Amino acid sequence: MGAGRSQSAAYELVADVPAGTWTLVADGIITDSVDVTFEILWRKASGTDVPIVTWQQHFDPLGGGNYDATPYEVTGDGPAITYAAGDQLVFRYTGDGTTTQMAYIPDGDGALANGRIPYIDLPQ
């Protein structure tokens, strides 16, 4: 994902989510310096997006042709989500400050790239 481009994934909600601490693990392969914004949104059935938690991080490549994952883990507090039929939880990440198309690539190889497959822990 390169400058100004975003990727997102939406998941159907099936219950309320309490207010509390969200954890994001987003280890990634970095091919060029990039500023990434990570967002978790509550997309109401009406189509309205409600921000839950947002993080920003600058990444630089490891260098030397090394394509191991760069670790990234962060927490943040978010409000409660009151579930209604048709609501979704959306994870979105956006890259800026680069001209490279794939400056940040989520680590889909996990331990094979010396990292972790990205995931989100919701508040309990």
Image: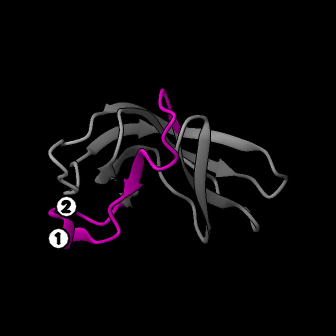
Residue identified by numbered label 1 = 111
Q: Residue at x 75, y 53 (%)?
A: 44
> Separation of disc 1 and disc 2 at Cα?
5 Å
Nearer to me, 102 or 24: 102
Q: Residue at x 20, y 65 (%)?
A: 113
Q: Residue at x 39, y 44 (%)?
A: 20
Whether residue 31 is situated above or below residue 11 in the rendered picture: above
Q: Position of residue 25 (x, y in %)?
A: 30, 53
SS at badge 2: loop
| Residue 13 showing in the rendered view | yes
Is residue 97 in the magenta section?
yes
Amino acid type shown at disc 2: Gly
The image quarter containing residue 16 is bottom right
Tag 1 and tag 2, C-beta contact below 8 Å: yes
Nearer to me, 7 or 64: 64
How many residues crowd around disc 2 within 10 Å: few (fewer than 14), some, or many (20 or more)?
many
Magenta residues (range): 95-118
Residue identified by numbered label 2 = 115
How many residues crowd around disc 1 within 10 Å: few (fewer than 14), some, or many (20 or more)?
few
Whether residue 78 is situated above or below residue 82 in the rendered picture: above
Q: For the C terminus, give its image quadrant.
A: bottom left
Horizontal relation, residue 97 to residue 4: left or right: left
Q: How many marks?
A: 2
Q: Position of residue 84 (x, y in %)?
A: 73, 62
Q: Position of residue 30 (x, y in %)?
A: 32, 46
Nearer to me, 74 or 77: 74
Q: Residue at x 31, y 53 (%)?
A: 28
